[in-house]
Amino acid sequence: MPKGPDYQEIEGLIIPKAFSPKCLRDSLRYKPKDNDVFIVTFPKCGTTWVQHIVINILKRGLPPESFEEFQRLSPFMELTGTGIVETMPRPGAIKTHLPFNMQPYSLQAKYIYVTRNPFDCCVSLFHHSRTLPVYQYSDGTFEDFFEIFINGETEFGDYFDHLLSWYEHRNDPNVLFLVYEKIKADTRAAVLKIAKFLGQEYEDMLVKDEQMMENIIRQTSVEYMKKSTNKHFGSFFGSVHSDEEIDNENIPEGLKHVLKYMKSINFKPQSEFTFVRKGIVGDWKNHFTQKQRERLKRKCIEKFKGTEIPEFWPDILK
Ligand code: A3P
């Protein structure tokens, strides 16, 4: 039996064991407000990057200043719970990792879905699970993790089913379907596309103001985010919080749950959190054996049959 990170299953969905089951249940029942924007992904497909692009656009060229501000403007609903989502200053963007059939859905809300090639996604999720202490997976091997991934048993379920569930909706007027590798290849075009989707005024703003556009591209670059975002995340998740600090009413319910969970597993403080890691295309080549490569490629061919998905990643799937 391959050993995976610490997970739990709630309402048929696999989530990290550190998450509050109640917050997940509340999230599944959240009723979107008109004009809610959601950023939806399978984990490690570029969520944080697109959250930062959206926040930089909504803040008219300014990046989030702290972890707290980032959470306020773009809460991860299944993690934080719905309280902070209800009070989110609007416009904001709610992050979820839900497959389409579980996603709170409204025709009046907007959905940005981001996907990434499954090879790099698998590697990124492996490192994420090894690095974050709540998974209790610092000794996890890629060999084991690969089996968990290819069998669709990681957090938030099966990568392929997740992608296919949203791919069906890629042309819906309230859905913007993005591919990580394409954002990387032409970030400017992607930022403009996202701005237009958020509202014509945002696209006009960027077309008129080249300096703002350049600032946004710089402030959402992997180099910039490696410094600022990892520092922000580390400032919250890197230390052991006292009971008094956890009780603070400004901390969302689900984050309190995680902080208590971290204490329960005797988490050791760490100043840096490499949430933003390499941010490149093709790191999978440093991890996959030839056999693993062939197996995942076969699975892609079988699952993506009849779709245009292979064209997203012609180099890998040719
Ligand atoms: P790697 O682990 O391959 O480096 P998510 O935000 O969905 O959890 O995705 C995390 C992945 O996106 C990580 O991939 C991370 O490094 C990458 N990423 C984060 N910010 C990025 C940026 N500004 N540009 C490119 N990739 C970024």
Image (cartoon, helix red, strand yellow):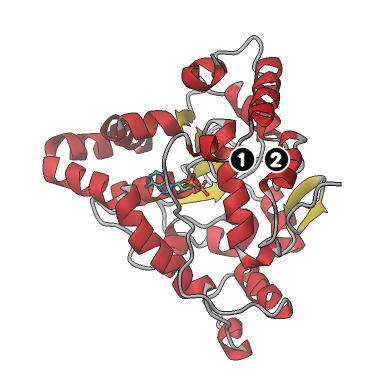
Q: Callout 2: few (<14), some (14-19), or many (20+) C-alpha neighbours within 10 Å?
A: many
Q: Name the residue under label 1.
A: 122
Residue occupying the far front of the picture: 290
Rendering quarter of residue 18: bottom right
x then y, percent, for residue 152: 75, 37
Q: Closest to the observer: 164 or 143?
A: 143
Whether 125 is drawn above or below 118: the answer is below
Q: Name the residue under label 2.
A: 146
Q: Closest to the observer: 200 or 229?
A: 229
x then y, percent, for residue 176: 46, 30
Q: Are marks 2 and 1 in contact (CB under 8 Å)?
A: yes
Q: Is mark 1 on a helix, strand or loop?
A: helix
Whether 247 is drawn above or below 307: the answer is below
Split into 4 quadrants, where in the image is the C terminus? top right
- Identified at 38% across, 50% down, the residue is 52
Q: Can residue 301 be seen in this view?
A: yes
Give the amino acid type for the residue marked by disc 1 in the picture.
Cys
Rendering quarter of residue 89: bottom left
Q: Closest to the observer: 130 or 218?
A: 130
Whether 318 is drawn above or below 274: the answer is above
Whether 54 is drawn above or below 290: the answer is below
x then y, percent, for residue 67: 43, 67
Q: Is mark 2 on a helix, strand or loop?
A: helix
